[in-house]
């Protein structure tokens, strides 16, 4: 927050940056909720013998003020940074087989965020989307072949390689309140 210009939000274009920054903060809160849930689920998986290599995937700004993606053992040991750039990288879900990670990449000073993916060890980082609108909340299909994400509030589904980006019709994405 201290890196934000003092006049942020006073210019016409700054409103989008401010909105994106607040969305980023909401994503951080969501990540903390996911982290707590993942920790609970990890204990259950270990009890069933379902987790071969238990690791926790998370984002943090511990090395220089921008959020990066990390992995660590459940006891906090072996913390490894998977991304290292000047953008905010956050909201990293595992692929179902835990071999890949999707994440949101939000460049500093930018108004758009895009979906990226990489191998579980941080190699093979690839940008999957390239749209001027804000893209976030990526998550994998159960078989790992597709990724769903939000583009300025609209739900989009694409192949895991970024091809065939298809909006979900609103009549299919509306939540029934009954």
Image (tube, grey):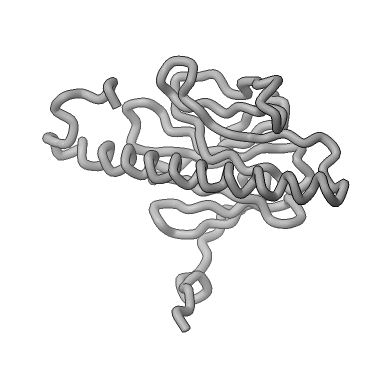
In-image side of 128 versus 151 (left or right): right
Front position in the image: 166 or 100: 100
Residue 77 visible? The answer is yes
Q: Is residue 118 above or below residue 134?
A: above
In the image: residue 165, left or right of residue 108: right
Q: Is residue 124 visible?
A: no
Instruction: Classify residue 144 as left or right of residue 158.
Output: right
Considering only vertical position in the picture, is 108 above or below 164? above
Q: Nearer the viewer, residue 111 or 138?
A: 138
Which residue is drawn at the image coordinates 41% and 28% (left, top)? 107
Relative placement, left or right, of 11 versus 143 is: left
Q: Position of residue 140 (x, y in %)?
A: 66, 51
* Residue located at (43% from left, 23% from top): 66
Residue 141 percent location from the top left of the image? 68, 56
Residue found 57% across the figure and 36% down from its top = 116
The outermost residue toward the top is 64
């Amino acid at each position: 927050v201290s890196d934000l210009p003092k006049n942020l939000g006073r210019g016409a274009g700054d409103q989008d940056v401010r909105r994106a920054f607040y969305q980023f903060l909401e994503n951080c809160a969501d990540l903390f909720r996911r982290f707590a849930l993942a920790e609970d689920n990890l204990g259950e998986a270990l009890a069933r013998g379902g987790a071969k290599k238990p690791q926790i995937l998370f984002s943090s700004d511990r090395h220089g003020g921008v959020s990066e993606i990390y992995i660590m053992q459940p006891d906090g040991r072996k913390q490894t940074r998977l991304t290292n750039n000047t953008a905010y990288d956050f909201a990293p879900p595992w692929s179902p087989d835990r071999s890949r990670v999707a994440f949101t990449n939000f460049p500093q000073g930018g108004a758009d965020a895009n979906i990226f993916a990489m191998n579980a060890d941080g190699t093979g980082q690839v940008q999957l989307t390239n749209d001027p609108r804000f893209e976030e909340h990526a998550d994998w299909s159960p078989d790992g072949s597709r990724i769903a994400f939000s583009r300025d509030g609209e739900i989009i589904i694409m192949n895991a390689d970024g091809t065939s980006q298809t909006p979900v019709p609103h009549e299919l994405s509306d939540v029934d309140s009954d």
